Amino acid sequence: MSDPVQKPDTPYNFAYLDEQTKRMIRRAILKAVAIPGYQVPFASREMPMPYGWGTGGVQVTAAVIGPDDVLKVIDQGADDTTNAVSIRAFFAKTARVATTTRTEAATIIQTRHRVPEMPLTESQILVYQVPIPEPLRFLEPRETETRVMHALQEYGLMHVKLYEDIARHGHIATTYAYPVKVEGRYVMDPSPIPKFDNPKLTNSPALQLFGAGREKRIYALPPFTKVESLDFEDHPFEVQRFCEPCGLCGATGVYLDEVILDDKGGRMFVCSDSDYCEGRREEGHRGHLAGALAGAAEAGE
Amino acid sequence: MSAPLNETQAPLLSAENVTRFYGTRLGCREVSFQLYPGEVLAVVGESGSGKTTLLNCLAARLSLSSGAVRYLMRDGVMRDLASLGEAERRFLMRTDWGFVHQNPSDGLRMNVSAGANVGERLMAVGQRHYGQIRGSALSWMERVEVPADRVDDSPRAFSGGMRQRLQIARNLVTAPRLVFMDEPTGGLDVSVQARLLDLIRALVAELDMAALIVTHDLAVARLLSHRIMVMKEGEVVEEGLTDRVLDDPREPYTQLLVSSILQA
Ligand SMILES: [Zn+2]
């Protein structure tokens, strides 16, 4: 976190929020870092964008960003969605920071629903946008009760939810927002990332911050925190597996999105992390369907 | 029910001048008794007699205005319930105690399956093997006569009697030594009531549990309890072995209660 800098050529305070608000949010972040996985209430502010657009993440980013930071914003792995572009533009305008789409070039990455494929480093902060921070809400809607359950570590209900999954589907069918236990203490919702990304949370060198705007909660995973996905002994946690590599770059062991190519059932799987995919193609990797997208586009014209 | 009273043992629960006011209004006053392991005590009275207030005080669901409730913890130490921390109290409630509500939907999770309802306590105390949890749920459903093929159904799809049996199974899965029951057969058809009473009687005897049953129905008390406490206007007016109190009531109020039930 650098000192706030008032830039003369913008009508906004640095990163939009006033200094007092940023201090308040930083205090919440410090508390969250001190108690990994614990949801810290904060006085969430109105932001010039609707809830659901990551107002929690934006406030966290605004509180930690400095003029020398380089910001990357991803939405489901892509840098080019309206949501990602808007948030990037917001900070380019209000903080005049450099932005990037390259994971390795970024010092702060704000994300909606993905963790980048490239391993993060100690000099990076990953800021998650969180819609619903309370993992217990599914079965216990009363907040007074969930607070006590966290305080007393009464987490049997999380397994009731997983039990229901297995009873209904024969396996744990939860594929995103898959609950984790942090340092053996707090159960935490990792936000709606695919469970594929859960193993990236544990022991990460990067600082991971989670902001829920509408729900007014901030929580954190300090670097090198132990994060375990909940499971049963006879139904252990497993990540999704894909039966083919990325059609564009040939990557395996990454999270893939299904892309529909035409109305005749043609489809391909490509990296959800578009920057990772581009990087591999620049290095010369080619998938078995490289060219198919371009071909489909031409055929459609 | 014949009495297995064994007063050479330490009591499981001891009530000492239990008193509860709601502001200036009396809930119950200076109720004292001891409950022994395996004993079934019925608290009877009309609505407004204070029996439900007493039950909630004894079950640590309501704080006392004065007096004390002590319980023999599993480690053999008699503890004042008011001295327990919240974590200890909640742990006691979901392991060594059960609480059967009159309305099953107050005691069940209506949005998860029957199997998950029965298995919840096991998961709460740290069981992490799905197959074993499900196995326990199935075996308990069988014991309370809920068909095994309903294990994945929501309790919403169950009849009132079946819901109540499921609620009982959900409570008994951790082998509690004491179960509180608030009008457990209230609101059910007479034929359904009879079957449920038989089930409760058999389970209590088989599992050697103590039970505290609040009921306005003397027939329920007769069938299930070893001892009876009769309450009126917040106080205990008569107390004794069930057969003695019902066959030879000494207090005029008890005589009135017994005669009205006989005439009904
Ligand atoms: Zn790729």
Image (tube, coloured by chain):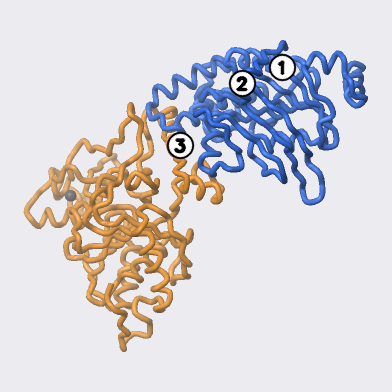
Chain colours: A orange, B blue
Mark 2 and mark 3 residues within 8 Å of each other at the beta carbon: no
Q: How far apart are marks 2 and 1 (CA)?
A: 15 Å
Residue for badge 1: B224
Can marks 2 and 3 be said to lie on one chain?
no
User: Residue B258 appears in which quarter of the rendering?
Assistant: top right
* Placement of the C terminus of chain A among the 4 image quadrants: bottom left
- Amino acid bearing label 3: Gly
Residue B24: where, in percent of width, then height?
81, 50
Farthest residue in the front direction?
B8
Please say if B4 is above or below A70. above
Q: In percent of the image, x 92 and y 23: which residue is there? A: B256
- Mark 2 crowd level (few <14, some 14–19, many ≥20, 10 Å Cα): many
Farthest residue in the left direction?
A284
Residue for badge 2: B37
Q: How far apart are marks 2 and 3 (CA)?
A: 29 Å
Please say if B24 is above or below B15. below
- Mark 3 crowd level (few <14, some 14–19, many ≥20, 10 Å Cα): many
Tag 3's secondary structure?
helix
In this orientation, does residue A260 appear? no
Residue A213: where, in percent of width, then height?
44, 62
* Placement of the N terminus of chain A among the 4 image quadrants: bottom left
Chain of the residue under label 2: B
In the image, B174 versus B5, the foreground residue is B5
- Amino acid bearing label 2: Pro
Residue A134: where, in percent of width, then height?
46, 50
Q: In percent of the image, x 14 and y 50: which residue is there? A: A291
Q: Distance between the residues labelled 1 and 3?
A: 33 Å
Residue for badge 3: A156
Mark 1 or mark 3, whichever is nearer to me = 1
